[in-house]
Image: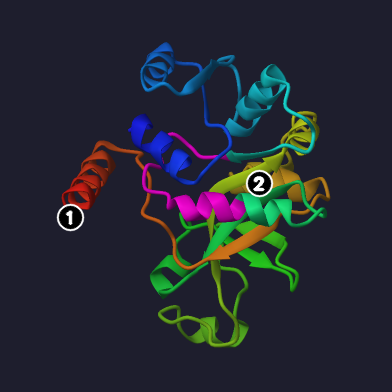
Amino acid sequence: MIAHVCARALEADADEVVVATDDVRIFDAVNALGIKAVMTRADHQSGTERIAEVAALCGWSDEQIIVNLQGDEPLIPPTYIRDLAAALAGQQQAGIATLAATIQDAEELFNPNAVKVVLNHLGYALYFSRATIPWDRELFAKTQSQLSPLMPHYRHIGLYAYRVAFLKRYCQWQPSPLEQIECLEQLRILWQGESVLVQVVAKTPPAGVDTAADLRRVEQILCDRYQS
């Protein structure tokens, strides 16, 4: 699976692909592919903290942009990686950017496992939540089986791009009450008063691999893709 994730990063034309891990099995597998791997500490609380350690080890400059592609996401479209990095590079207000896609059905909108994000008119995040936001007071009081016609709802997609300077600040912050109650790490950023740029993409990519069933599903998708 990690080989497929590396392939997506290479297809995005990244200047450099680096795999950060605390598992020697992953380290050895990546090196066998001819791709750079970096062993990190095992006590990190998040992937963001792990990437911050790699940025320090590699001596990357404060303005360097890093895209965090998680090792369980072999189906992320390479264009999403490339476009996210370009979006962050095109502005200076935020040190971090992420993705969202328009929600197309009510079941997803009311599913607490689907994280929603509300944007301002400039495309920056106002809030992330497992709750249904924004809440259409008139419609949703009557039914929760249809989408609001007043404005689109967006699902957050957990792909992030950072500037190194942002990573340094992030590692100095303690977990916030908002992220603890919602179990959403990105709320730490809004709690600190920082901006998060949100790039809206055409559709939510296929889910990553969290279970054995997910692995079988992804294997079949990749098999079909390479045989077609």
Label 1 belongs to which residue? 228
**Distance between mark 1 and mark 2 Cα atoms:** 38 Å
Q: Of circles 1 and 2, which is in front?
A: 1
The answer to whether residue 77 is magenta is: yes
Mark number for residue 84? none
- Looking at the image, which is closer to me, 139 or 153? 153
Quarter of the picture containing the N terminus is top left
Label 2 belongs to which residue? 186
Q: Are marks 1 and 2 in contact (CB under 8 Å)?
A: no
Type of the residue with mark 1: Ser
- Looking at the image, which is closer to me, 102 or 106? 102
Residue found at x 72% / y 43%: 188
| Coloring basis for residues | rainbow
Q: Secondary structure at mark 1?
A: loop
Residue 214 occupies which quadrant of the picture? Answer: top left
- Looking at the image, which is closer to me, 79 or 214? 79
Left or right: residue 75 versus residue 59 is: left
Residue 32 occupies which quadrant of the picture? Answer: top left
Residue 221 visible in the picture: yes
Q: Which residues are magenta?
A: 68-84
The answer to whether residue 214 is magenta is: no
